[in-house]
């Protein structure tokens, strides 16, 4: 099997396929190999990348994105490189409507280059990241619409998902609408379930996509999904965040000063829940207000103090958030909303795990850099095999790792890993992660900082903005390092 060609031919046409497995088991590489294999088959391919920038993908997988047949929709908010494949950008994965518009534009441009769309491949990497920014029902509708752009043309729609990325009910719902799935394990082993060559069982792929060894039995849809489900949230320690802690104050300082969305004269019965939830995630304070005048009614005003940034009818905002459709007219308050700092208020452990995985993937892709991670208790790392595997991989890539938490376990003595079992009470409450790449690296870093207020309920922020990342690293090092 060379460069994904055999996989594409085995999968057939007009299919929706879910690529699922533990973190860092080769799902992205598998998807890129299919992109590489599309051009020799005179097929077009488009990758929607939520975590890795277009520059990163092009540098890391040279020759995989044929300029005449392939493209990337970069959802990281970084500047697009001046390179040959079709490239489109979106400020962040939170803008599903923007993603839909970018995909539509990219497919049109690819079709112009290749003489039309011929059984196109559309791949999303990854669903776990998209789910962080929106509710599942909206994500589900978005995937159905996006997949149709490939399937209706006789092509393929694939989406990657970490096995701990969604709750079991949501994962089951996705699987029920897919024609089949490709399961991954270890670092580069996969098997077909319900589509493709299901008789092969587990096979091992090399970095260029060729299959070398048959490793096990064939898969069936009746098999228990050994790669599904997140670690049991009940194993998290019961703690309560100290409001007077230095970390709590740092969170408040970082989140302070965001813009406000004022909802003016909202009619009774008008549901603004989706609007409020979306903007709260963007660290925008939402304030309903009743004015002394009759008009305007049902209007959303985005402002920074007295400076008006944008205004839109609330109905238009709600419709755009609900549709995630490339035909949706632009909505000014959505376009003007900041998308650099995201607030996590009363979020659960699974959501934080998804955010953590996106940051850890950034670190694994680089040769170096520094990662600081707070685990509440150091034993939490040892009790989670998937996370342990991730940090073993990080250690192998040359990333300098500092781990923080209550010293209730002895961690492996890996070179490049230092465990800081500290007495600070707030570390019992703290789940944080900050990664900064090497100074000469153009890849982005990321940070997540939260405190546990109640059993399994956290508040804080996450960001990929370089200034926020640098500020968080400075705080962690000055506060917790000896």
Image: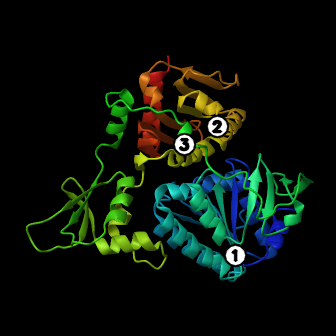
Where's residue 182, x and y in %? 75, 61
Query: Looking at the image, which residue sits at the far left?
Result: 292
Q: Residue at x 62, y 63 (%)?
A: 172
- Dividing the picture into quadrants, the one containing residue 377 is top right
Where's residue 28, x and y in %? 69, 55
Q: Residues within 10 Å of mark 2 (few under 14, many from 20)?
A: some
- Indicate which disc residue 384 carries: 2
Where's residue 362, x and y in %? 60, 45
Query: Quick one: SS at disc 1?
Result: loop
Q: Is residue 29 above or below residue 384?
A: below
| Mark earlier in primary sequence (1, 3) | 1
Residues at badges 2 and 1 in contact (C-beta under 8 Å)?
no
Residue wearing tag 1: 120
Query: Quick one: SS at disc 2?
Result: loop
Spatial separation of the CA atoms under disc 2 and disc 3: 11 Å
- Indicate which disc residue 257 carries: none
- Dividing the picture into quadrants, the one containing residue 382 is top right
């Amino acid at each position: 099997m060379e460069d994904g060609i055999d996989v594409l031919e085995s999968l057939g046409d007009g299919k929706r396929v879910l690529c699922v497995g533990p973190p860092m088991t080769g799902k992205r590489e598998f998807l890129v190999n299919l992109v590489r294999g599309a051009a020799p088959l005179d097929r077009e391919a488009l990758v929607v990348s939520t975590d890795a920038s277009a520059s990163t993908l092009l540098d890391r997988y040279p020759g995989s994105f044929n300029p005449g047949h392939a493209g990337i929709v970069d959802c990281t908010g970084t500047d697009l490189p001046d390179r040959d494949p079709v490239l489109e950008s979106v400020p962040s994965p939170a803008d599903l409507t923007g993603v839909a518009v970018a995909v539509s534009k990219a497919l049109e441009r690819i079709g112009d280059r290749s003489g039309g769309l011929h059984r196109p491949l559309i791949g999303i990497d990854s669903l776990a990241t998209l789910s962080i920014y929106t509710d599942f029902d909206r994500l589900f509708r978005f995937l159905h619409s996006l997949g149709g752009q490939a399937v209706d043309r006789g092509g393929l729609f694939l989406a990657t998902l970490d096995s701990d990325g969604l709750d079991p009910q949501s994962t089951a719902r996705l699987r029920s609408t897919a024609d089949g799935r490709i399961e991954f394990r270890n670092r580069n082993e996969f098997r077909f379930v319900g589509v493709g060559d299901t008789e092969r069982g587990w096979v091992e792929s090399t970095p260029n996509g060729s299959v070398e060894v048959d490793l096990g039995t064939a898969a069936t849809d009746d098999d228990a999904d050994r790669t599904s489900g997140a670690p049991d949230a009940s194993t998290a320690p019961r703690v309560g965040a100290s409001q007077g802690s230095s970390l709590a104050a740092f969170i408040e300082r970082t989140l302070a000063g965001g813009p406000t969305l004022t909802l003016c004269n909202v009619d009774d019965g008008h549901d603004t829940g989706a609007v409020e939830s979306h903007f709260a995630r963007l660290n925008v304070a939402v304030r309903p207000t009743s004015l002394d005048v009759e008009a305007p009614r049902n209007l959303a005003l985005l402002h920074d103090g007295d400076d008006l940034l944008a205004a839109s009818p609330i109905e238009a905002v709600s419709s755009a958030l609900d549709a995630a459709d490339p035909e949706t007219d632009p909505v000014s308050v959505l376009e003007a909303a900041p998308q650099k700092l995201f607030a996590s208020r009363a979020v659960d452990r699974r959501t934080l795990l998804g955010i953590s995985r996106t940051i850890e993937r950034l670190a694994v892709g680089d040769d170096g850099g520094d990662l600081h991670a707070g685990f509440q208790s150091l034993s939490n790392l040892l009790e989670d095999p998937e996370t342990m595997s991730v940090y073993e991989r990080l250690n192998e890539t040359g990333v300098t790792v500092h781990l923080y938490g209550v010293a209730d376990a002895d961690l492996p003595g890996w070179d490049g890993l230092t465990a800081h079992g500290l007495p600070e009470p707030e570390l019992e409450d703290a789940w944080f992660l900050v990664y900064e790449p090497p100074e000469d690296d153009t890849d982005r870093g990321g940070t997540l900082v939260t405190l546990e207020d109640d059993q399994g309920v956290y508040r804080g922020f996450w960001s990929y903005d370089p200034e926020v990342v640098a500020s968080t690293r400075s705080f962690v090092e000055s506060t917790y390092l000896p």
